[in-house]
Amino acid sequence: MADSNFIDYVKILCRSGKGGAGSRHFYRAKYVPKGGPDGGDGGRGGHIILRGNKNMWTLLPLKYNRHVFAGNGQSGSGGRSFGKDGDDVIIEVPCGTVVFEAETGEYLCEVNEDGEEIKLLRGGRGGLGNWHFKSATNRTPRYAQPGEPAIEKSVILELKLLADVGLVGFPNAGKSTLLSSVSAARPKIADYPFTTMEPQLGIVSYRDNRSFVMADIPGIIEGASEGKGLGLRFLRHIERNAVLLFMVPADANDIRTEYEILLRELTQFNPELVDKHRVLAISKSDMLDDELIAEMEKDLPEDIPHVFISSVTGQGITALKDMLWQAITDESNRIEPTTITHRPLDGHHRVREEDEFIFENVPTMSDDEDEEFFDEEWDDEIEYDWDDDIDPKEYE
């Protein structure tokens, strides 16, 4: 997987900008004695913003840009001059990206629509200048507010492909062959296990110029939920699918047993996958006759619709499309993106090489910048806090 351009899991370090310090300047001019305070407010720090991009299909750009830092707000100055706001940083991500906190694995947010923007980290608000604190009893306030500090956080971005139908099956079950026969996708097909090393998407044409998206993931083996094989890493891509198409070859020793193994692995990965609509397709059925098909139907699971198909001869493909379309358009199967519950990242759902990644050479604020960021003199008896009641300026 190291040479693949398809990256669906990456760990990055984000830091929003610090807010600029307010100025404690006093107006000074010839013939204007006691000009009074006129220190301006500091600018706000830059935000870290996620933006969905339908033209992206991988998180590869972030793999080589793991440090994302927004600009700091500048300090205020005399004449009630406000400091410049820090520059925002916009991170372009594919639609279907989910964000987790790296330390705890807690779900933070997700981006599903093209152009959708989510403020991942808010920049610090700028401090108020001393002119805000003047009053009848305090005409020369010699203090101002410092800016709010920056927020630094390590996050994990996980891409979950947006598709209507997800293919689930053991290696060499005929998933890639089916995808190539019903769509224009050209996945790698060979007679050895784990031919598919990364997810593949294909658009399947249906009647009356309608279509739906089908996703193929690497084969699952028994014990995948415990870290065996490749299927566990890519099971995240079927969490958003409306329908799960289980594929079991006709030459399997026991179709029911293989189906139950696949269902058990999905349940252990995410229990909510059991609630999705499921369809069972028995592939490679061109080697069966009608009598043998009738005999095999007696041992198939009764709680799931099934169809015998052959991707080579086209047997049962039309019936399969009808079953999938009916399941996709079923009103009871419509799930809004906001209602999807994403399981938190734990030891089974993490990618070890990303989780153990160490951020090196992280730039920090220099001593000179620290001196510019805060005022030179502070009154130790004043408690500097953020009170929204005395804040006359609206901070974005």
Image (cartoon, grey):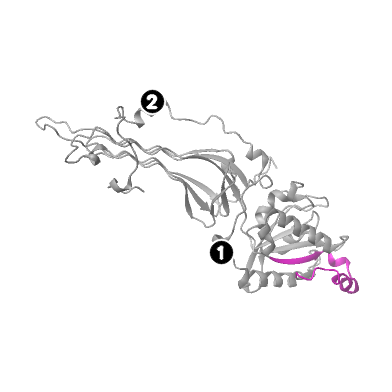
Image coordinates of residue 331 in percent, x first then y, are 61, 72
Q: What kind of residue is marked 2? A: Asp
Q: Is residue 345 left or right of residue 197?
A: left
Magenta-colored stretch includes residue 123 = no
Residue to which mark 1 is pinned: 336
Image coordinates of residue 242 in percent, x first then y, are 64, 64
Specify whether residue 92 is in view. Answer: yes
Q: Please count the marks in the image.
A: 2
Image coordinates of residue 274 in percent, x first then y, are 69, 62
Position of 328 relative to 267 (above/below): below
Q: Is residue 51 left or right of residue 298?
A: left
Q: Residues within 10 Å of mark 1 (few under 14, many from 20)?
A: few
The residue at 65%/57% (across/down) is 239
Residue in front for this viewpoint, 112 or 223: 223
Q: Quadrant of residue 297?
A: bottom right
State the separation of the CA atoms marked 1 and 2. Answer: 50 Å
Residue to which mark 2 is pinned: 368
Q: Quadrant of residue 268?
A: bottom right
Q: Is residue 61 left or right of residue 118?
A: right
Q: Residues within 10 Å of mark 2 (few under 14, many from 20)?
A: few
Q: What kind of residue is marked 1? A: Glu
Which stretch did the figure color magenta? Answer: 277-304
